[in-house]
Image (cartoon, grey):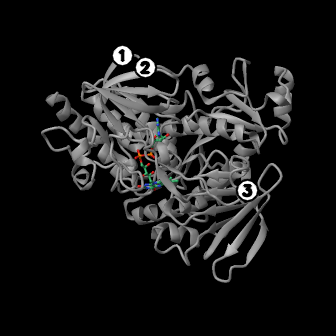
Amino acid sequence: MNKPVILVVDDDPQVLAAVRRDLRSRYRESYSVVGAASGEEALATVRELKARGDALAVVITDQRMPGIHGTEVLSRTREIYPDARRVLLTAYSDIDAAVRAINESHLDHYLSKPWDPPEERLFPVVDDLLDTWQAGYLPEAKGLRLVGHQWSPRSHEIKNFLASNLIPYRWLDVARDEAARALLEAGGVSPEDLPALFFEDGSVLRQPEPRQVAERLGRPLSAAFDVYDLVIVGAGPAGLAAAVYGASEGLRTLLLDRHSPGGQAGTSSRIENYLGFPAGVSGSELTRRAVAQAQRLGAEFIVPLEVMGISIADGYKRLALGDGREIVTRTVLAATGMEYREHQAPGVADLSGAGVYYGAATAEAPAFRGRRVLVVGGGNSAGQGAMYLARFASEVQIVVRRDSLRETMSQYLIDQIAGTSNIRLRSLTEIDRVEGDGRVERVALRSLEDGASRVEEVDAVFIFIGTRPRSDWLPAGVLRDAKGFVLTGRDLRAADAFARTWKERREPMALETSAPGVFAAGDVRSGAMNRVASAVGEGAMSVRLVHEYLSLT
Ligand SMILES: Cc1cc2nc3c(=O)[nH]c(=O)nc-3n(C[C@H](O)[C@H](O)[C@H](O)COP(=O)(O)OP(=O)(O)OC[C@H]3O[C@@H](n4cnc5c(N)ncnc54)[C@H](O)[C@@H]3O)c2cc1C
């Protein structure tokens, strides 16, 4: 197997030689640094690498070249190597082109010439890009391989678990992949045992549960201590931020999640409005960084582990866990966010996981290459989902009940969708039913203008509507609004049951619930802003309040 490649493109021979020399001095052990003197030569090299089956990690290209420009090299490389990181090398006067390229070519970074000293201005950028690329890279013959049926909900569950827990794996569809059948034969695995997860050492897990996979991968599944200062329930942006601050400020901090870190944000293919990431950042990348940061600072992290309930006595909170055990803590942060509500159209429940998916389901998107899919919903999450699916599917239809996306989606996404030829908006339309034999094959779509229903062939339906707070695990003493979102701070005063519930002499703190020492942050909280940044802000702020509460007890 050849080393992964870093490709450098510049028509100025001196610049090309200098960048290659600098990159070689640092990366030659693990990467081949390849040069190209024009856009045309770069694209020929990319096609050659693909034909040889080599991995392309990073492309660094000059912008102004005769013939094919740098931005076009990056866009076309992305079609062949979607995961390769893309960097534009610009003169100071070209910064505008670089900023435009962030949108058009989904640029990861731009570097201004000159980049001296490379230790400060080149290597930190390339180190970071290689780190990100490595996190998702799995050499052809190595690592985990999951074999199963594309339309099996069990396969979907394990794919989703591996992908959202950022565990690289290779998916092999038993109906399409020769390699899948060879693996089954070699491992003595029968079709009834699917899905089956093959490990590098040759061992196999047949029809595994997510918890078994986590255990087999050596992830901790039980708490290290008997008593914690802070237990954070839910590892979305709010929980992860609280874990970073809690651990860094010396609190004995435990973070739990029933499924995977990242929460809703982790399913986003591209978050464009989070501060500090001018080129946008995928939810999985943001999550990878946040988990590494929380763990480095000393937070303990267990996943998958669900919290089923809390009982409170003498100021201590006992959390009942999904595995039957209990953990004791002095404070709790409820950061359990929201989840999609089941769509009620006939057929949806039966085909869930077999072509019907909730949210972006990024792990499934590549399976719909060349197929027709529907996205249901008109919010930003639906817009991002549609843009991501359009990279694979032949046609993506966005189904919304309103007459346009104007009031529900950000303009930057509306513009991106308008500029994507294989996305079509179906306004004033809703799903009547979903049909198919063991997998989605057809949907009946009803027009809200004339009430007419039409059956159309599609291969998948991605649902992005109808969310509800995940607050049902909290005890009755934690007051909620009419929709189930958790009331905190001053908002509690307006609740009828507040006077009966709150027995402290002090007022509840800003993010404190009606149970002293139980805080809430992020989307689960009544009045939340439903943004990554606001969830992160509240998670960070909650730790300050936890300190205050602990100082009172
Ligand atoms: C597809 C998509 C794209 C988005 N894009 C953007 C964007 O571009 N910009 C932006 O600002 N916002 C975006 N958002 C919104 C943003 O992701 C949310 O506002 C944010 O994730 C809320 O964070 P949170 O930590 O409060 O909750 P969540 O992200 O909902 O995380 C809650 C976590 O709690 C866990 N959990 C739930 N119940 C339990 C339990 N009982 N025990 C243990 N764990 C539990 C869940 O598994 C989950 O991981 C997007 C949302 C979606 C769905």
Q: Do the numbered discs 1 and 2 sit on residues whose CB atoms are within 8 Å?
A: yes
The residue under label 3 is which amino acid type?
A: Gly
Camera-nearest residue between 449 and 395: 449
Q: Which residue carries the number 3 mark?
A: 347
The residue under label 2 is which amino acid type?
A: Ala
Where disc 3 sits, the SS reads loop
Q: In which quarter of the image is the N terminus?
A: top right
Which residue occupies 51% across, 34% down? Answer: 258
Question: In this picture, is 136 found above or below 451?
Answer: above
Residue 226's disc number: 1
Task: Report x, y in % for residue 94.
Answer: 42, 63
Q: Residue furthest left?
A: 505
Residue 117's disc number: none
Q: Is residue 318 among the parts visible in the rendering?
A: yes
Q: Do the numbered discs 3 and 2 sit on residues whose CB atoms are within 8 Å?
A: no
Q: Does the residue labelled 2 lie within 8 Å of ligand 1?
A: no
Q: Is residue 118 among the parts visible in the rendering?
A: no
Task: Report x, y in % for residue 518.
Answer: 30, 36
Q: Which residue lies furthest to the bottom in this view?
A: 450
Where disc 1 sits, the SS reads loop
- Tell me where residue 41 sits by quadrant: bottom right
What's the CA distance linking mark 3 and mark 1?
A: 46 Å
Q: Which residue carries the number 2 mark?
A: 223
Camera-nearest residue between 474 and 45: 474
Q: Residues within 10 Å of mark 3 (few under 14, many from 20)?
A: some
Q: Is mark 3 within 8 Å of ligand 1?
A: no
The residue under label 1 is which amino acid type?
A: Asp
What's the CA distance linking mark 3 and mark 2?
A: 41 Å
What's the CA distance linking mark 1 and mark 2?
A: 8 Å
Number of marks in picture: 3
